Image: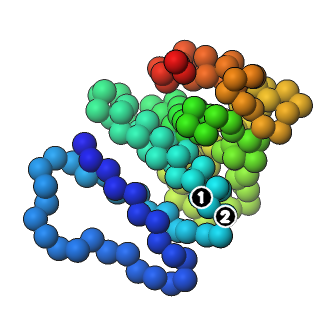
Amino acid sequence: MRYQLTIVSDGGGIWRQLPGPEPPGQMVSFWFPSGPDTDSLRRRVIATTAHEFQHIATALAGQPRRGGQREPDAYLAGACAQLMIEGAVARADLPGGHDPRADPFLPSAARRSAHAGSTTGGALLRFFGDADTLHINEGGRHLMRHCHETIGFPLQQ
């Protein structure tokens, strides 16, 4: 499986795939709007890509599409990837922030995902204690162990 990440300016630009022969195999593409905070963008790309690849991995493993744990596991994968790749994950970067007042305006899948993100982010706070940032070589070891035991995430070497 191949993947493509595209970062586009948010100034009203348009992104499109140019016509041409498709290489064999499956392609997964992600589109991210750019912004002035490149560190935040990088963390969002890491978390979102890991989240979506967790969905792909469970689908390829033959797990049911509507499994109740799939969305929380995908959010966990995003936090785990960010901790492993960046060496730290901040409270502010955990999934969450869902406003239930928006529920009537969201499709049911988006509503379920938003609730799962808020629940997962809240559950991960126990690893932080009083800290705003969890570092992999400190308290982050416990989160990495949880990632490994819960979704099979590789342990840091």
Rounded to the nearest angstrom, the CA distance separating label 1 from label 2 is: 6 Å
Across and down, in percent, residue 42 comes to 57, 53
Q: Write down the residue under mark 2.
A: 37
The image shows residue 145 at horizontal and vertical percentages of: 61, 17
- The disc at residue 41 is 1
Q: In the image, is residue 120 above or below residue 48?
A: above
| Dot 1 alpha-carbon crowd within 10 angstroms: few under 14, some 14 to 19, many 20 or more | some
Which of the 4 quarters of the picture holds residue 58? Answer: top left
Q: Which residue appears farthest toward the right when viewing the image?
A: 130
Residue 69 vs residue 21, the one in the foreground: 21
In x, y percent, where is residue 136? 67, 27
Q: Which mark is residue 122?
A: none
Q: Can residue 142 be seen in this view?
A: yes
Q: Where is residue 14 in the image (x, y as percent from the top left)?
A: 41, 80
Q: How crowded is mark 2: few (under 14 residues within 10 Å), some or many (20 or more)?
A: few
Q: In this view, does 143 lie to the left or right of 108?
A: right
Q: What element carries label 1?
A: helix
Q: What element does badge 2 sit on?
A: loop
**Residue type pointed to by label 2:** Asp
Q: Answer left or right for 118 relative to 110.
A: right
Residue depicted at x 61% and y 65%: 105
Please determine whether, in this image, residue 156 is positioned above or below residue 32: above
Disc 1 to disc 2: CB gap under 8 Å: yes
Q: What residue type is labelled 1?
A: Leu
In percent of the image, x 55 and y 83: which residue is there? 11
Q: Which residue is drawn at 66% across and 45% down?
A: 95
